[in-house]
Image: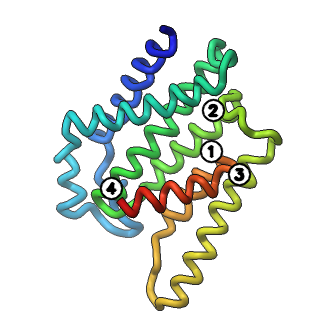
Amino acid sequence: MMFWMDLVFWCALGAAGAFAFRLLPAVWLCDYGETPGEAQAAVHRRLRWWQIAALGLLCGACTALLMLQCGPVFRTLRGTLGGLLAALFFSALLLAAVCDARYGILPDELLALAAAGAAGAWACGCFVHFAQWYAPFLGMAAGFFGLWAVQLLASKLYHTEAMGFGDVKLLGVCGFACGLGGLGVAVLLAVLAAAL
């Protein structure tokens, strides 16, 4: 019974995070040196209610499953704080995905929020799958520098910018949350999701 109450709470929190998409400044949806154009200024064409509910459900389910994995630590104040920070991580990642799909940009501010949420959840003991304290940092370095190398190589081969640097930063954040071992699975899931 407690799991279902937790799930409802985390889903509501995730929906609130998705609803916060309405509050994003239009300048966050611009590339460096650009000013908000019509597409970014029309950010007030917001997410529909069912999209907010779907993002909330997804964020809530991810956070609830993470908290289920944490076990007894979640029932402490430290675990609850870690859960809130993990929800921040998942919400920021989902909002970054929405921004990327709609506007083709990954806002640095959302990636910084996701990184802060992941770091806080890790510090609170919610990412218990790390055997060593340095595992998330190895994952972050592997994700960041690995995709940066791919970006540089592809840019040289195609003589054009192959991908934005936001993708590189995003994989660094995901590497921090997943660790080195889970980074490969995260990349595989990202490729499969992109193919859909």
Residue 39: % across, % down: 20, 60
Earlier residue among tags 3 and 2: 2
> In the rendering, which numbered label is found on residue 177?
1
Circle 3 crowding by C-alpha within 10 Å: few under 14, some 14–19, many from 20 = some
* Mark 1 residue type: Ala
Earlier residue among tags 4 and 1: 4
* Mark 2 residue type: Ala
Residue 11: % across, % down: 39, 25
State the CA–CA distance, disc 3 to disc 1: 11 Å
Earlier residue among tags 2 and 4: 4
State the CA–CA distance, disc 2 to disc 4: 29 Å
- Residues tagged 2 and 1 counted as in contact (Cβ below 8 A): yes
Residue 64 lies, with reference to residue 72, above or below; the image says below
Residue 29 lies, with reference to residue 125, above or below; the image says below
Between circles 2 and 4, the one closer to the viewer is 2
Question: Element at badge 3?
Answer: helix
Q: Which residue is mark 3?
A: 181
Between circles 3 and 2, the one closer to the viewer is 3
Question: Element at badge 2?
Answer: helix
Q: Which residue is mark 2?
A: 121
State the CA–CA distance, disc 2 to disc 1: 9 Å
Identify the residue at image location x=59%, y=19%. Answer: 80
Question: Element at badge 1?
Answer: helix
Relative side of 139 to 42, left or right: right
Residue 52: % across, % down: 28, 35
Earlier residue among tags 3 and 4: 4
Between circles 3 and 1, the one closer to the viewer is 3
Q: Which residue is mark 4?
A: 27
Between circles 2 and 1, the one closer to the viewer is 1
Between circles 4 and 1, the one closer to the viewer is 1
Earlier residue among tags 2 and 1: 2
Circle 1 crowding by C-alpha within 10 Å: few under 14, some 14–19, many from 20 = many
